[in-house]
Amino acid sequence: MSTNLFLDELEVAKLTIYQLIQNEGPLPLSTLRKELSFTERRLQMVLLEIEQDLKILLKRTVSFSLLDGLALPNDAPNATAYRQFLFANSLLAQAFIFMVESPHKTIQEFCQENYLSRATVFRRLKPLQRLLAPFQLKFNISQLQLTGDELAIRYLLCNIFWLVQPNLLQNSNSLDSTFLQLVENIVSTFHNVTAYGSRHKLALCLHICQARRLAGFYIEDELLLSDLPLRDELVLKNHAAFREHLLPTTPSQHLAQEELGFYFLIYTGAIYVSPNTLSFEMFQEWWQQPTPEKKAIADFGQLVRENFFKGETPVYFELILANIMGTFNASALLQGTPPMIYMLMESSLRSPDPLFQELEKFCLHYLQMVARRKNFAWLKKNTAILASIFAYFLWPSLQAAVRQTKLRVSVLAEDNFILMLPLYAFLRSVSYVELLPYEPDAPQQFDLVIFPHHSFQPTEFTGPTFLYTDEAVQNNFACLNAQLKKLQVAKFNIK
């Protein structure tokens, strides 16, 4: 979703060609034209655009040599870095920068500064309106303004810039000296491996919040300290520095909510990477204070253990549940706003595996049931996206649990080393396969029996079988691999 949202047709073509050249180059021009169905003129135009981008990135002139096929310079950034460059320079990213840094300027000024027609801007920004629908926010393209709940607007802006490039905004990494200790106090509550990123995130959030206040926009939600997984002493420790920072731009009636709104941006969502952190300790203390939302997630955790983990608690399950609760809490406080980054990356994070889909369906059914309860009306519009992210959080643990389930496999072999060698090599490469000799007196102990001829099929065995031929070798055992995975999931016995 994020690529199609941020990049127009030309930019997508540039990224596609760049990836092909990097992965398969040097590439003849004719091969590239054939693979993309581009005319020679269009291909030359896109290549020229890529050369201009590389000139900016490498700070020198770059020209593709067509003699030996298209190839990137040795010092060219990889395709991921180039994609980030395209995102950062996209019309959508520039529009967000404009909204934060020049909130009172007009769309005419935006068009002039970016050398674009009004029609082009309207056409390219139209998808943003669809993106914002779940946030209950409105985007007025003619005025380049976001309207709606201010906390949701800041949540959106912080997530967008964090995803695209945190330093896109001018001076977004600079901090007032009076704020440095406050930042370190907050950074110290997270794991030290995230300290560098946390400082940048804090600086970005502070910058966006300050820009919104300078434009006259203030948080008016009725947040309470008990809504957030924080200790009173942490807030008190930073209170004086925060007030000093807020007073020049904030009317007195908004001071408390502005302070809590900042903590909301930092301490809600999926933020827990280790149980050995102060932030997780604060969450555990907060988790003990009963609310309907916490009970809903606690019940969900118990049902997940019963239905997918045979009643056992997977490794780091408390940490996973904390991130599920953090995500759920953010949506609850914003009255339904879903996780922004997951929405943008959903297509690449969701697994096509049938077991993932089973897990996702379970999460969806539970959330739909919760949405019918009193005070959970906000959940109805976002059960699908939250179910998807809950399944995403739980998926690695479920995969690990399934991998521990062994399959007892027997091969009714023949004395043909040429034919049987690839099969045995494949089966020994599958970690969950236990290869055993066939026992006619106890056939039902096997989960799968493999044989190279129909005439070898034992009449006393009534379980799953696989007919092994040279075709399996030619297909790299794709069908056998799929059958083994299906049998393993079935043997794991999800309720």
Image: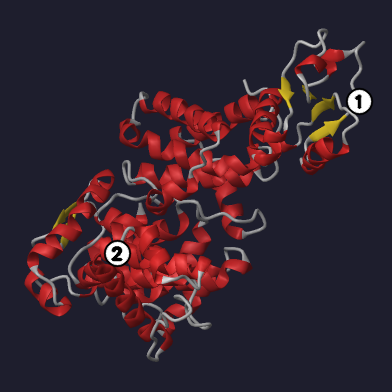
Query: Would residue 307 be visible to someone looking at this image?
Result: yes
Q: Is residue 218 above or below residue 65?
A: above
> Considering only order in the chain, which callout, 1 or 2, is on the residue closer to the N terminus?
2
Amino acid type, mark 2:
Leu
Q: Which mark is residue 255?
A: 2
Residue 102 as seen in the image, left or right of residue 28: left
Amino acid type, mark 1:
Pro
Where does residue 473 sit, x and y in percent of width and height? 71, 39
In front of the other: 100 or 43? 43
Q: Is residue 345 above or below residue 70?
A: above
For the point 46% across and 63% down, which residue is it?
235
Q: Is residue 16 above or below residue 467?
A: below
For the point 68% across and 37% down, which residue is it?
477
Residue 205 as seen in the image, left or right of residue 305: left
Q: Which mark is residue 437?
A: 1
In front of the other: 267 or 116? 116
